[in-house]
């Protein structure tokens, strides 16, 4: 089974500097035209591990995003959260802290919290 083509929005964020700000620690943000909503994409490469490890990493990241983003993420941006090998075993409290730091570094915090 092959994966489908990435969405146009995801490809735009993959584009580099013209697409938005990138963060080596695993996040990217790009400006959107409608400006009212937050869209979030999750990705994990095979470097993270087998399918079980990749899915676990994405589930953990989704739970962290569900906790952090509603009160902190600036609307009107697309976010891509990237799972790394460390994501699978990292303590959850540190994942939350990492996500808040990533939001700050890409300029995605609401009203400069």
Image: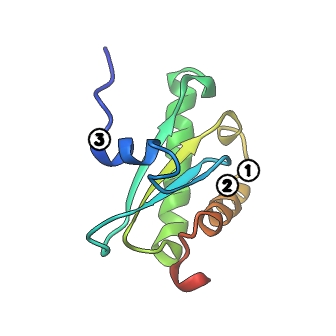
- Residue 31 rendering spot, x and y as whole percentages: 40, 64
Residue underneath mark 1: 91
Residue 15, picture quadrant = top left
C-alpha span from label 3 to label 2: 26 Å
- Residue 17 rendering spot, x and y as whole percentages: 52, 51
Q: Residue at x 51, y 60 (%)?
A: 65
Q: Residue at x 67, y 33 (%)?
A: 85
In the image: residue 105, left or right of residue 50: right
Q: Say few, some or many: other residues with alpha carbon within 10 Å of mark 3 (under 14 / 14 to 19 / 20 or more).
A: few
Callout 2–callout 1 Cβ contact below 8 Å = yes
Residue closer to the observer: 81 or 63: 81
C-alpha span from label 2 to label 1: 7 Å
C-alpha span from label 1 to label 3: 31 Å
Q: Compared to 25, does 44 lie above or below?
A: above
Which element is circle 1 on? loop
Residue underneath mark 3: 7
Dot 3 or dot 2: first in sequence order is 3
> Colour mode?
rainbow
- Residue 100 rendering spot, x and y as whole percentages: 64, 66
Specify the quadrant that holds the C terminus: bottom right
Q: Compared to 99, does 27 lie above or below?
A: above
User: Residue 95 got which mark?
Assistant: 2
The extreme top residue here reads 1
Specify the quadrant that holds the N terminus: top left
Q: Residue at x 44, y 52 (%)?
A: 19
- Residue 14 rendering spot, x and y as whole percentages: 45, 42
Which element is circle 2 on? helix
Q: Say few, some or many: other residues with alpha carbon within 10 Å of mark 2 (under 14 / 14 to 19 / 20 or more).
A: many
Callout 1–callout 3 Cβ contact below 8 Å = no
């Amino acid at each position: 089974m092959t994966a489908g083509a990435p969405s146009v929005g995801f490809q735009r964020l993959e584009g580099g500097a013209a697409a938005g700000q990138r963060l080596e620690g695993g996040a990217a943000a790009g400006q959107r035209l409608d400006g009212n909503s937050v869209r979030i994409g999750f990705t994990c490469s095979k470097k993270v591990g087998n399918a079980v490890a990749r899915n676990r990493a994405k589930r953990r990241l989704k739970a962290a995003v569900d906790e952090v983003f509603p009160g902190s993420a600036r609307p009107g941006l697309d976010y891509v959260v990237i799972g790394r090998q460390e994501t699978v075993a990292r303590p959850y409290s540190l994942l939350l802290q990492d996500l808040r730091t990533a939001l700050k570094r890409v300029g995605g915090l609401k009203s400069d919290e």
